[in-house]
Amino acid sequence: MHFIPQELDNYVVKHTEDEPKLLKQLTRETYQKILQPRMLSGHYQGRILSMISKLIQPKIILEIGTYTGYSALCLAEGLHQNGQLHTIDVNEELYDFQRKYFDASEFGTQIKQHLGSAIDVIPELEGGFDLVFIDADKENYPNYFNLIIDKLNPGGVILSDNVLWSGKVIEPLNPKDVSTKAVLEYNTLLKEDDRIETVLLSVRDGLTISRKR
């Protein structure tokens, strides 16, 4: 989703850190073989995720929504030397695709895949998260927040993707549109919860940074 003119967006991307070779390959294969390739974080947002992770230098990362593994690899770039990234996805058909690229990276041994519903998996994880990235089914965003907030370390950061939801957040709400309704509720939750401080960035389809107090 682009909210600025394409020419200006091209300039922004051109003056951003180059996309790593392995991620270019992952992008190419995703577009060739996988449904809904637009779900990829992509070059620009991927570099943002990488930069934030490098600034935080997390020991434990949780990602909710793996897809083909692009964002996980970006987040892993900032991992502490002995850190670990847990990534959850419900699509078992993508498991081997993800693993291939994880193992081709320098972070393969640090990335642990979890197959199943995040609602079921998160309670089984010990926690102590320094960084959480939420990019999954929008209807469960509020549920994910409630499951992770007590497992997030003080000073830990939650990154939430697609919080502008193609601009639907400012359009009249269709009562049958459960996804938009959930995103609206989630954005309000992040703004009003006293346990965190939040900034919503107009990056691509909206990226929120929330820091636990």
Image (cartoon, rainbow, N blue to C red):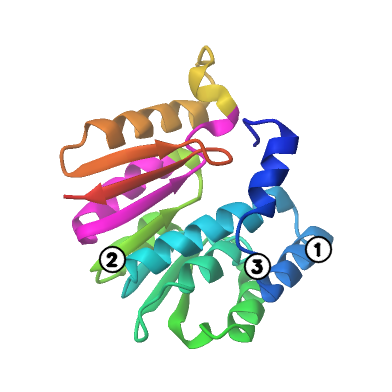
- Three-letter code, disc 3: Leu
Q: Which mark is residue 33?
A: 1
**Cα separation between marks 2 and 3:** 25 Å
**Does the stretch in magenta take in 143?**
yes
199 left or right of 63 in image: left
Residue 205 to residue 180: above or below: below
Q: Residue at 49% of width from left, 23% of height from top?
A: 169
Q: Residue at 41% of width from left, 59% of height from top?
A: 52
Q: Which residue bears the numbered disc 2?
A: 129
Q: Where does residue 116 sit, x and y in percent of width and height?
A: 48, 63
**In the structure shown, which secondary structural element does the residue marked by tag 2 occupy?**
strand
Q: How many marks?
A: 3
**Cα separation between marks 2 and 1:** 33 Å
Q: Which residues are magenta?
A: 140-166
**Does the stretch in magenta take in 192?**
no
**In the structure shown, which secondary structural element does the residue marked by tag 3 occupy?**
helix
